Image (tube, helix red, strand yellow):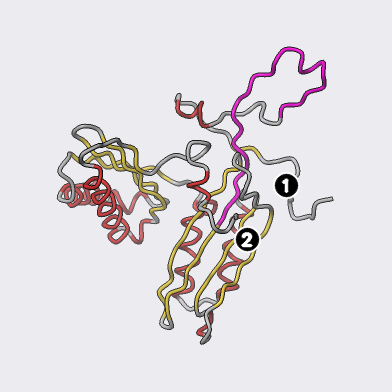
Amino acid sequence: MGQKVNPHGLRLGINKEWDSVWYAEKDFAKFILEDHNLRKFIKNNLQNAKVARVTIKRTTDRVKITLHSASPGIIIGRNGQSIKELTEKLQKLSEQKVDVEIFEIKRPEVNAQLVAETIAKDLENRTAFRRAMRQAMMRAMKNGSRGIKTAVSGRLGGADIARTESFHEGTIPLQTLRADIDYGFAEAKTTYGILGVKVWLYRGEVLPFVPRERGDRDRGFRNRWEGGAGYADAKKGKKTQAVPRSNDRQGAPRQ
């Protein structure tokens, strides 16, 4: 099941949020198409800006677009000229007032989408796929990832028959809903075909706060979810806290 279900969709409302936040009845189809066109335009025009995620929030008269990027300086440009031009172009794709915000990703090595795009770019530059995958995994583990799994599919190395190669390191609890699993997908357009790159990245657990009931200490009850901040607290303005599991592997097999 773990490889067939999108980790983000499985955890929506638990420790993941929607990329599009709005409500509509009559104009639902129009807004869906508009969101698709906005994301497609941003992805095509900001290929070098390392945009990992685009979130869209709508009100009655405004569209707020947040770009999660590891290189915000490329988007902003000198004296903010580039972001002004981008806002004007996005305004032509929407009937509502468009506002653009930029959120900086400080550690791109532990962002699954950016890791997948890095592997895809290496493959396009004729790097051996095993080397590209292992280098990306090594950087992720050095920067605090609890586990990572990568998979590349297609005509690997120019072979006539397409196949899938995957590597993993650490632990990847795909079916644990409280686990913070980041997922990314990218395509590498090579001379011998398109290669698909998938990345699963485990960054710890997001634990919702559950108050201890009276008498639990006397009965020896141990609450596994105690002592964290979860999605419900995040909606109130509090930050979520990712904590590693006690039985996570750190280079050594489990006992």
From the image, tell me which residue sits under label 2: 138
Structural crowding at the residue carrying mark 2, measured as other residues with C-alpha within 10 Å and reported as few (<14), some (14–19) or many (≥20): some
Residue closest to the eye, 26 or 7? 26
Mark in front: 2 vs 1:
1
User: Is 246 drawn above or below residue 7 in the view shown?
Assistant: above
Task: Tell me which label, 2 or 1, sits earlier in the chain.
Answer: 2
Residue numbers of the magenta segment = 200-223
Instruction: Between residue 161 and residue 120, name the one nearer to us.
Output: 161
Q: Choose top left, top right, bottom left or bottom right for residue 169.
A: bottom right
Image point (45%, 69%), residue name: 121
- Asked whether, in this view, residue 4 is left or right of residue 31, the answer is right
Toward the front, the furthest residue is: 26
In the displayed structure, 107 sits above or below 162; it is above
State the residue at coordinates (49%, 52%).
108
Q: Main secondary structure of the magenta part?
A: loop
Where residue 104 appears, as percent x and y from the top left, is 41, 44
